[in-house]
Image (cartoon, rainbow, N blue to C red):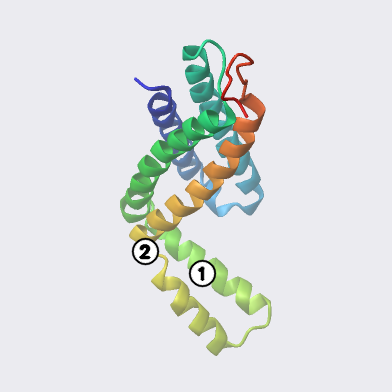
């Protein structure tokens, strides 16, 4: 199995388990815990990208270019992103459908707290509802995840590249 598939599956599995643990513990509704969730997700990405890049680097006698490392990280993130987007759809549609209502109610309260009029709040909430279906949450989650994974892939590739000094085609 290619390292990016292996670590993409591991990353998707770990983030799915983390999401389910958070759901069971009620972490989603606790603003103070969101940073812990972000730290865990970043750690999962770092672990998986590192593992996939090292896997390819080891196959290439300990060397990997920045371009190759980024491709491996991106492909790992793509596998994670596809699986997590499908999971997100099922999560918001069947496991935790009330979370969308929670988000909309919180947004409504935040707008009222900022002094927006009832008409402004109603218009804003009606616009947000259009983008808050399980399918749209999965699509937007995938897009966000691919942007995040690309940035993480750039960082990890820059850190983990190890150019072959004997490679005449090297930069």
Quadrant of the drawing holding the N terminus: top left
Considering depth in this image, is 92 or 73 the residue closer to the camera? 73
Question: Which residue shows up at 44% across the image and 26% down it?
Answer: 7
Question: Which residue shows up at 60% across the image and 43% down it?
Answer: 38
Is any atom of residue 30 visible in this view?
A: yes
Which secondary structure lies at badge 1?
helix
Question: Which residue shows up at 31% across the image and 52% down it?
Answer: 94
Q: Residue 44 location in percent, x, y?
A: 54, 32
Location of residue 100 by image quarter: bottom left
Neighbor class of circle 1 (other Cα within 10 Å; few <14, some 14-19, many 20+) is few
Question: Which residue shows up at 58% across the image and 36% down it?
Answer: 40
According to the picture, the residue beneath numbered tag 1 turns out to be 105
Which-is-in-front pick, marks 1 and 2?
Answer: 2
Which secondary structure lies at badge 2?
loop
Q: Residue 115 location in percent, x, y?
A: 68, 82
Q: Residue 83 location in percent, x, y?
A: 36, 40
Location of residue 137 by image quarter: bottom left
Q: Residue 134 location in percent, x, y?
A: 35, 58
Q: Is residue 80 above or below residue 164?
A: below
Checking the image for residue 133, the label placed there is 2
Label whose residue precedes the other's in the sequence (1 or 2)? 1
Neighbor class of circle 2 (other Cα within 10 Å; few <14, some 14-19, many 20+) is some
Q: Is residue 135 left or right of residue 103?
A: left
Q: Is residue 29 left or right of residue 114?
A: left
Q: Is residue 123 left or right of residue 155?
A: left
Is any atom of residue 17 visible in this view?
A: no
- The answer for how far apart the CA atoms under marks 1 and 2 are is 15 Å
Checking the image for residue 83, the label placed there is none
Considering depth in this image, is 55 or 162 the residue closer to the camera? 162
Quadrant of the drawing holding the C terminus: top right
């Amino acid at each position: 199995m290619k390292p990016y598939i292996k670590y993409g599956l591991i990353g998707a599995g770990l983030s799915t388990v983390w999401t389910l643990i958070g759901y069971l513990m009620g972490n989603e509704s606790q603003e103070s815990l969101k940073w812990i969730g972000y730290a865990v997700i970043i750690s999962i990405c770092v672990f998986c990208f590192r593992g996939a890049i090292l896997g390819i680097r080891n196959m290439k006698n300990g060397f990997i270019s920045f371009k190759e490392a980024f491709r491996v990280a991106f492909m790992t993130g793509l596998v994670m992103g596809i699986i997590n987007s499908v999971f997100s759809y099922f999560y918001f549609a069947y496991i935790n459908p009330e979370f969308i209502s929670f988000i909309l109610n919180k947004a409504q309260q935040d707008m009222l707290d900022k002094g927006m009029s009832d008409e402004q709040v109603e218009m804003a909430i009606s616009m947000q509802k259009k983008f808050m279906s399980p399918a749209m949450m999965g699509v937007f989650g995938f897009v966000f995840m691919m942007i995040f994974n690309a940035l993480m892939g750039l960082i990890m590739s820059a850190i983990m590249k190890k150019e072959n000094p004997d490679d005449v085609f090297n930069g």
